[in-house]
Image: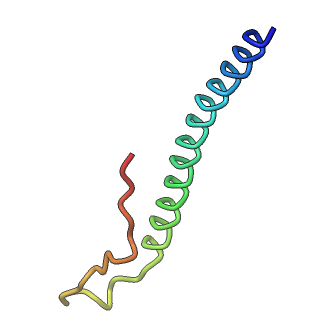
Amino acid sequence: MYTKTLQIVAISLVTAAVVGCGTTKSQRATEQILVWNAVDRAVANINFRRLAGKSVFLDTRYLKTVKS
């Protein structure tokens, strides 16, 4: 009886861990897509005519690289 209960608990934990990992990765991917879409839309609305012919610097300090 104890062994059967232990097996059920172990299988439940493994199943929860496997399903949870997939959900986390999927959520991260979705969040990354949403953020980059927002960045793309924001940059598309910038009027760059005032910068024509000038040197510019892109500060990437607040952009985070996410490694999977």
Residue at 52% x, 42% y: name it.
25
The quadrant in which the N terminus is found is top right
Residue at 47% x, 67% y: name it.
39
Name the image quarter holding residue 3: top right
Locate residue 27, reporting x and y percent: 59, 46
9 and 33: which is toward the camera: 9
Locate residue 64, reporting x and y percent: 39, 66
Establish if 61 lies above or below 18: below
23 and 33: which is toward the camera: 23
Establish if 56 lies above or below 10: below
Locate residue 40, reporting x and y percent: 45, 64
In the figure, is residue 1 to the left or right of 33?
Answer: right
In the figure, is residue 48 to the left or right of 53?
Answer: right
The quadrant in which the C terminus is found is top left
In the figure, is residue 58 to the left or right of 3?
Answer: left
In the figure, is residue 28 to the left or right of 66?
Answer: right
Residue at 56% x, 34% y: name it.
22
49 and 33: which is toward the camera: 33
Establish if 4 lies above or below 43: above
Q: How is the image coloured?
A: rainbow
Name the image quarter holding residue 62: bottom left
Residue at 34% x, 82% y: name it.
48
Name the image quarter holding residue 58: bottom left
49 and 2: which is toward the camera: 2
Locate residue 20, reporting x and y percent: 62, 36
